[in-house]
């Protein structure tokens, strides 16, 4: 099985962290291929940057998904996940929807930890789009850019533990989603300091995508997820334009 991880941030550092965690989470025999955006924000932090990243995501998917069995969008806003799902015949999963789905299987009240109050609205929209927004009982936005660069992460991890325990105490959450691609693998490292299960989108997304590949869902032949064939386009990359021609 070959899985494609699509990071439309332009940070190779983020892609490297995600790929490492994904390989640890994958089953034996699963090959992980991770690709990085060539244009747009280094780390997406606004609606405008995310809109640019949607184009980047589709271009990456068109170019690299041809011989892959499934695609995981490893931007925590699940950037262009539904569009990629429409365009491809293989399963496509967003990392935040994966973590949220798993969290709701072990607890009815879910807490969400994110980085930056600026993007709280983006995360609310992302989670609302999954249909599971009513399960979110509490939010905590941490202000730190440290996770997006190499170096000591002990202070960031202290903040995460404090926020997680506050969610348990004040909002009575029963499971926690830690957002951000760079948080891949962090919940396992901190779990003994937090009294409820905590999940990230990579260590949940890879096994969940593997399961979807094995289930082999049929591609829709009608409706909004049918292939968008026979469409005229202008100015797209050759790989992306070819997806619309059929």
Image (tube, helix red, strand yellow):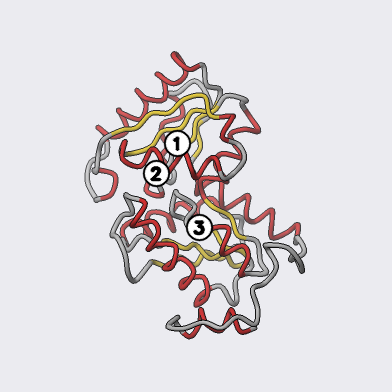
Position of 154 with respect to 141 (left or right) is left
Of the image marks 2 and 3, the number of the one nearer the N terminus: 3
* Residue 175 spot, x, y in % from top left: 54, 27
The front one of 3 and 113 is 113
**Eyeballing the image, is 71 above or below 149?**
below
Element class at badge 2: helix
* Residue 225 spot, x, y in % from top left: 68, 63
CB-based contact (under 8 Å), mark 1 and mark 3: no
Indicate which disc residue 60 carries.
none
The front one of 228 and 1 is 228
CB-based contact (under 8 Å), mark 1 and mark 2: yes
Which numbered disc, 1 or 3, marks the residue closer to the eye? 3
Q: Crowdedness of circle 2 by 10 Å Cα count: few (<14), some, many (20+)?
A: many
Q: Residue at point 60% right, 80% down?
A: 231
* Residue 134 spot, x, y in % from top left: 59, 30
Q: Residue at point 60% right, 36% down?
A: 132
Q: Residue at point 59% right, 77% down?
A: 66
Tell me the quarter of the picture where residue 227 sits. Answer: bottom right
* Residue 40 spot, x, y in % from top left: 31, 65
Quadrant, the C terminus: bottom right
Element class at badge 3: strand
Q: Crowdedness of circle 1 by 10 Å Cα count: few (<14), some, many (20+)?
A: many
**Eyeballing the image, is 141 above or below 109?**
below
Indicate which disc residue 183 carries.
2
Q: Name the residue under label 3.
A: 73
Of the image marks 1 and 3, the number of the one nearer the N terminus: 3
Q: Crowdedness of circle 3 by 10 Å Cα count: few (<14), some, many (20+)?
A: many
Indicate which disc residue 187 carries.
1
CB-based contact (under 8 Å), mark 2 and mark 3: no
């Amino acid at each position: 099985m070959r899985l494609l991880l699509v990071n439309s941030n332009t940070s190779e550092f983020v892609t490297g962290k995600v790929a490492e965690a994904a390989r640890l989470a994958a089953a034996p025999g699963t090959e992980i291929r991770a690709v990085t955006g060539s244009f747009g924000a280094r780390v997406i932090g606004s609606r405008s940057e995310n809109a640019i990243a949607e184009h980047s995501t589709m271009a990456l998917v068109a170019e690299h998904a041809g011989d892959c069995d499934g695609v995981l969008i490893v931007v925590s806003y699940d950037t262009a996940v539904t569009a990629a799902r429409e365009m491809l015949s293989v399963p496509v999963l967003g990392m935040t929807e994966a973590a949220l789905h798993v969290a709701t299987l072990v607890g009815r009240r879910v807490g969400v930890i994110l980085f930056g109050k600026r993007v709280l609205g983006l995360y609310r929209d992302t989670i609302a789009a999954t249909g599971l927004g009513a399960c979110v009982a509490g939010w905590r936005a941490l202000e730190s850019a440290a996770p997006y660069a190499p170096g000591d992460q002990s202070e960031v991890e202290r903040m995460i533990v404090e926020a997680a325990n506050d969610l348990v105490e004040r909002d009575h959450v029963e499971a926690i989603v830690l957002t951000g691609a760079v948080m891949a693998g962090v919940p396992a490292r901190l779990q003994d300091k937090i009294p409820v299960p905590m999940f990230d989108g990579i260590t949940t997304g890879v096994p969940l995508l593997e399961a979807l590949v094995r289930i082999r869902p049929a591609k829709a032949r009608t409706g909004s997820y049918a292939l968008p064939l026979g469409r005229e386009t202008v100015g797209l990359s050759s790989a992306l334009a070819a997806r619309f021609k059929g």
